[in-house]
Amino acid sequence: MSDHGIVIEKNPEGWAILTLSRPEKFNTLSIAMRQTLEGEIAELAFDPDTHVLILTGAAKFFTAGLDLDEWESSVGQSAAAFKHDFVATLRKFPGPIIAAVNGPAITGGLEIVLACDFVVASHEAKFADTHVHVGLLPGWGGSVRMIERVGLARAKELAFTGQFFSAEDAYRWGLVNHLVQHDDLLPFCQNLARQMLKADPTHLKTYKSLLDQEAHLILSSALAHEQEKAKEVNLHSSLSQIKNRLKKFTQSKK
């Protein structure tokens, strides 16, 4: 099934592969695409035959996050930045979520990776958090979950420098669970799903819920604080300001 740059393939063994497929724009997420993602993920969550979700990108990118060309859309900055928060919907999927990172996962794309339960990356994957260099703050849980994955000191360095880091570094730091050859990425993720589904799917979902609830006793207030601050800063940024900052940042890396 394909709609608004999203391809969903269901496997009869109990998992679904959701592919972000907008390769001409680095799989960036338009408003329509995020709206569709909300609905599709919610539907998969209630599908009695889907117990594990594998999330990946088409072609050479995982995703570069928001489609900035829609920042000042006809529905306004607020909608472009925060409406259709599919990451919140993603976190409600009751079974395990595997990020199959096939290429660059940048800024909002990195936040999506961090929202998944497991991260499997090919050697062609790389990551970056460029929020600060375009004058924005993460609003999909990136700041909180990055600290959780790599520690405060490294999270600060990656956020403040905006530097790209390799899949190998991400694996070494604990952000990535498994590092595989590019052609082995989806087969590895499907085998991981197959291993998990040797357990009763109901028990699998119950255990995930237990672990998430225990973690969120601490995380919930931090996530709310992040989104509050993101709205304060991001809604005052114009598209021209963002693009000028991005151009300056890109030139500084040459």
Image (tube, rainbow, N blue to C red):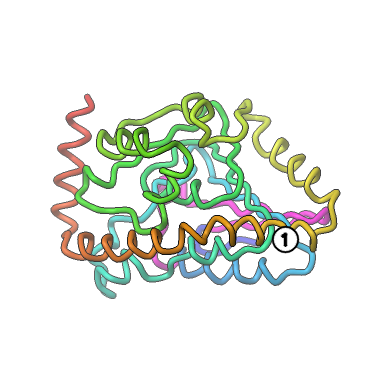
Q: Quadrant of residue 42?
A: bottom right
Q: Nearer the viewer, residue 4 or 129?
A: 129
User: Residue 31, percent across and down?
Assistant: 39, 66
Q: Residue at x 36, y 33 (%)?
A: 154
Magenta region includes residue 24: yes
The residue at which mark 1 appears reads as 205
Residue 187: x %, y % from top left: 72, 37
Q: Position of residue 44 (x, y in %)?
A: 67, 66
Magenta span includes 147: no
- Residue at image position (40%, 29%) is 165
User: 143 or 70: nearer the eye?
Assistant: 143
Q: Which residues are magenta?
A: 6-32
Q: Determine crowd level at label 1: few under 14, some 14-19, many 20+ residues with C-alpha closer than 10 A.
A: some
Residue name at image x 65 percent, y 30 percent: 183
The N terminus lies in quadrant: bottom right
How far across and down, in percent of the image, does residue 55 sit?
A: 59, 50
Residue 233 falls left or right of residue 21:
left
Q: Residue at x 52, y 25 (%)?
A: 172
Give above or below for 108 relative to 201.
Answer: above
At label 1, the amino acid type is Lys
The secondary structure type at the circle numbered 1 is helix
Q: Find residue 189 and report its image quarter.
A: top right
